[in-house]
Amino acid sequence: MDFAEFYRAAKDDCLRSVLVSVGDRDTAQELVAEAFARAWASWGTVSRHPVPAAWVVRTALNANISRWRRRRREVPLPDPGAVADLPAAGEAADGPVDAQIMAALLRLPGRQRQVVALRLFLDLDTVRTAEVLGIAPGTVTAHLARAIATLRDDLTSADQQETLS
Amino acid sequence: MNDDTLMTTVREPFTAVHMDTPVEQIVGRGRAVRARRRILGLAGAAAMVAGAAVAVTALLPAGHPAGAQLAAWTVTGQANGTIRVTIRELRDAARLQSTLRADGVPASVTFGSEPNPSCREYPGTWNLSKSGIQADSGPPYIFAIHPSALPRGAGVQIGGKFDFAYSIPGHPATTYISPWPPPKSPVSGVVRVPVLMAGLVQASPQCTGLTSRLDG
């Protein structure tokens, strides 16, 4: 498989996986684009990876951890009066995605969101998810079970509230 | 709702999300990544030789006699509620974190390592002028945190690391700090420099200890 073919086939699911983890469309797209660029630069190695898309997602998530360092280039000035312009955390939902579902995902702890994203969009099994995230398979199972339980409670109660209103 | 139905319900709305970056743009960026790797390989080797001495010099306040015993950092409360953090050396991050939390600031502090992986960036905080944090370039590095101006649910993340700084021949007036921007030509004057930053993260027990600021 050449890189262009891989990119066309995997780019949307990689973006969706990272979007669930970082919660912001523009950030996710930037991270995934950079991760694909790194995949191109190491395509000889990445193409032999059992799941190259998982390599891209893992690289994008790692880049997100380092990304905060670049904020130092801003020259901050205090303007406490302007904080009212900031969006509330609950407004982080990405445009094209149902706000209720996005909010429910964003309320999950970060690791649970990553596990859910890899299962949802890359269809990784427990062992492969554990390899990608560098955690034990049992931990993946526990995270997924908790995430599903939380999402079910969250989305079911939201449906009931809509029904009542 | 069984597990499969739930997963389908969660997955379905994301079908509207598409990556629209052209592959040509990805490949162009990939070429820059390759070039940067070659350059940083050389820069890293040079920095290993001169790094430690340069770093210590850079951390001392200008004019201070070498070898003086300095506190790594100081936290002081101002009458207006502002908390002033002065960092002179990248040491004792855990104690600085504890001190800030004891002062009611949800905080995560790391020096010389990646930030706490449990921390999630607070949405919409790329403009730090609206974050309730003021930072002066150093050394020493001074952050003024205005707890009452922190957005609801936000905490403060402070990090310090050593990066590579270098010049690109032909652009002597500019000093670059890796990894951005990627150099396209040989670099010179490579040194290790301490870099401090502060930003907002979503407050949580795993990241900032406190889940909200403690006023008063």
Image (cartoon, coloured by chain):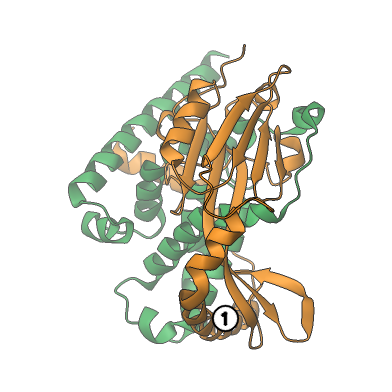
* Quarter where residue B130 is shown: top right
Which quadrant is the C terminus of chain B positioned in?
Answer: top right
Position of residue B81 relative to residue A98, above or below, is above
| Residue farthest toward the left in the current orientation of the protein | A138
Q: Residue A35's spot in the image, x, y percent? A: 51, 69
Residue under numbered circle 1: B36
Left or right: where A55 falls relative to B71: left
Along the line of sight, which residue is nearer the eye, B86 or A139? B86
Residue positioned 27% across, 38% down in the render: A145
Identify which residue is drawn at 48% across, 21% down: B102
Chain in green, by letter, is A
Residue sitting at x 43%, y 34%: B95
Query: Callout 1: 10 Å neighbours few (<14), some, many (20+)?
Result: many
Q: Is residue B15 left or right of residue A144?
A: right
Left or right of A145: which side holds A30? right
As displayed, is residue B156 above or below residue B46? Answer: above
Chain of the residue on which disc 1 is drawn: B
The N terminus of chain B: image quadrant: top left
Residue drawn at point x = 71 percent, y = 25 percent? B149
Figure label count: 1
Q: Amino acid at mark 1?
A: Arg
- The tint chain B carries is orange
Would residue A7 be seen by someone viewing this image from the given angle? no
Query: What element does badge 1 sit on?
Result: helix
Choose between A75 and A162: the one closer to the eye: A75
Residue B168: x percent and y percent?
Answer: 70, 82
Residue B108 location, x and y as percent? 49, 37
**On the rendered structure, is A155 left or right of B165?**
left
Q: Is residue B47 visible?
A: yes
* Camera-nearest residue between A85 and B85: B85
- x then y, percent, for residue A101: 51, 37
